[in-house]
Every structure is written in C-alpha cells, then in structure tokens.
Image (cartoon, grey):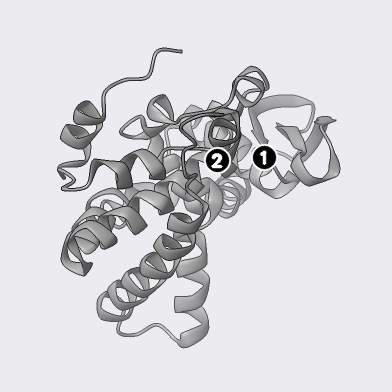
C-alpha cells in the first residue's frame, strides 16, 4: 500500500508537528522498523507507553468533572470502556489512521493494518508524540476531539452488548446469544470471529483479538440493524 503523506494526516488531526520524526515514529510498527537494515526506524512502542499515561490522566479528569454524581467504581468502569482497545480503534478509524501506519511486509499480508490492537496502539502513540512535541495542552485538545467527543453516540459502541441485551429483552425479540465461528492464529495474537444471534437468526458479526471484543463488534453491528441511536 502506498503510504499517504504525513501532511495529509496532520490536516485530519488538526495538529502540525514541529518534529516530523515524532509523528513518523508514532506510525511505525516494529515489523517495519525491523525491516530497515540501513536507516533503522524507531517504532511506536515507547510513545504508546507515554500516550497511554497521558490518556488515562486526561480522560480521568474529564469524567471526574462531567459526572459529579458517579462513584469511584462507576468512573473507573466508564473510563475503562472509553480507553479500551476496541474503543480506541473505533475512534482512530473515524479519521482513517490505519491508512498511514508503516507496517512490515509480513504484518501487512496477515492483516495488521486492520487489527484493533495495532490501530489502538498507534492512537496512543500519537498522543505521546503530540505531548512530547508541544506539551499537555495540545495532547488534551487531540484527546477531547477524537476520543472524548460525542460520547453519547460512542456509548452505542462502548456498551454495545449491554444495550443490545436491553433492546432484545424490552421488545421480546427472542433469545440473544453469541456463537464463535472461528479462532485463528497463535496464542499471543489470536483472531476470533463471532456471530450475534437471536434464536437461530444471525443479527451481527464481529471479529477481535479476544472473544469479548468480537462479541462487542457483533452487538454493535446488530444495533445498527435495529436503528438504535
């Protein structure tokens, strides 16, 4: 795949890097870095570590200020749903970050560009890169724009299984259950494909690195069919 320009991505995220190498590093998977024999690239893993910490702080403060009646346990649960792997990948796909990731040939062939684990890691790495490039204010702007915005709509994705169960029970649609269709890959990097079904009728399909993530995606697809908003 031909890599799109860094300038194009900067326009999408509304931030121009002073140090372009930070953005390039945030987009570089270890498989690509390892293939570069002469001009070795740094991969995104250290930036991801930093971005994860910044995201947890910013999201914690945001939820604390916006949900004054919530208990500590409720805030922790809500934060976990917002910053989980599948949720971050969902947010990242809204501006097509997967199109800009630098992947090694093997990782590209095996579908790494569409893998939630990689896309969510890059999302956090970009946060870390922005923080190093300009400090907390710009990192906060990015997080609020792409992760903490329009939470009511995103709640359909974050809590898809719970909401689907409520819809099915409310409307007496039948017996909701999830069926594992396939399980592929090594133990450290499995891909699960799951169907959401009401009785014997398929209502949604999802894939993910865990069965829970695959079920969540299947439920989200099913909600779309029921026009839940």
The disc label shown at residue 52, or none: none
Q: Name the side, left or right, on which 55 lies relative to 149.
A: right
* Residue 168 visible within the image: yes
Q: Residue furthest front?
A: 38
Can see residue 157?
no
The numbered disc on residue 118 is 2
Residue extending furthest top?
2
Mark 2 and mark 1 residues within 8 Å of each other at the beta carbon: no
Please tell me which residue lies in front, 183 or 16. 16
What residue is disc 1 on?
214
The residue positioned 54% from the left and 36% from the top of the image is: 33
Image position of 157 with respect to 62: above or below:
above
In this view of the protein, which residue sits in the foreground, 57 or 163?
A: 57
Quarter residue 135 falls in: bottom left
Nearer to the camera, 66 or 141: 141
User: Cα distance, mark 2 to mark 1?
Assistant: 16 Å
In percent of the image, x 51 and y 29: which residue is there? 38
Element under label 1?
helix
Crowding around mark 1 (Cα neighbors within 10 Å: few <14, some 14 to 19, many 20+) is: many
Left or right relative to 145: residue 45: right
- Residue 21: horizontal and vertical position, in percent? 30, 42
Q: Position of residue 154 (x, y in %)?
A: 38, 48
Image quarter for residue 178?
A: top right
Dot placed on the residue nearer the N-terminal end, 2 or 1: 2
Q: How many numbered markers are drawn? A: 2
- Within 10 Å of the Cα at label 2, are there few (<14), some (14-19), or many (20+) other Cα atoms? some
Q: Nearer the viewer, mark 2 or mark 1?
A: 2
Q: Quadrant of residue 171?
A: top right
Considering the numbered disc 2 on the image, is that residue within a helix, a strand or a loop? helix
């Amino acid at each position: 795949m031909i890599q799109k320009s860094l300038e194009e991505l900067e326009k999408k995220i509304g931030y121009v890097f002073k140090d372009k190498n930070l953005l390039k590093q945030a987009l570089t998977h270890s498989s690509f870095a390892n293939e570069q024999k002469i001009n070795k690239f740094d991969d995104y893993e250290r930036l991801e570590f930093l971005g994860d910490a910044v995201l947890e702080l910013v999201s914690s403060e945001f939820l604390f200020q916006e949900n004054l009646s919530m208990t500590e346990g409720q805030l922790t649960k809500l934060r976990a749903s917002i910053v989980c792997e599948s949720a971050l990948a969902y947010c990242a796909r809204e501006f097509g970050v997967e199109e800009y990731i630098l992947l090694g040939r093997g990782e590209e062939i095996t579908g790494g560009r569409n893998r939630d684990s990689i896309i969510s890691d890059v999302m956090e790495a970009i946060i870390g890169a922005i923080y190093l490039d300009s400090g907390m204010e710009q990192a906060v702007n990015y997080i609020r724009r792409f992760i903490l915005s329009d939470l009511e709509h995103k709640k359909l994705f974050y809590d898809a299984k719970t909401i689907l169960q409520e819809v099915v029970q409310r409307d007496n649609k039948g017996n909701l259950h999830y069926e594992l269709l396939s399980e592929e890959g090594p133990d450290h990097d499995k891909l699960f494909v799951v169907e959401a079904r009401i009785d014997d009728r398929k209502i949604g399909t999802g894939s993910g690195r865990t069965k829970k993530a695959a079920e969540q995606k299947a439920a989200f697809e099913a909600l779309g069919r029921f026009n839940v908003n």
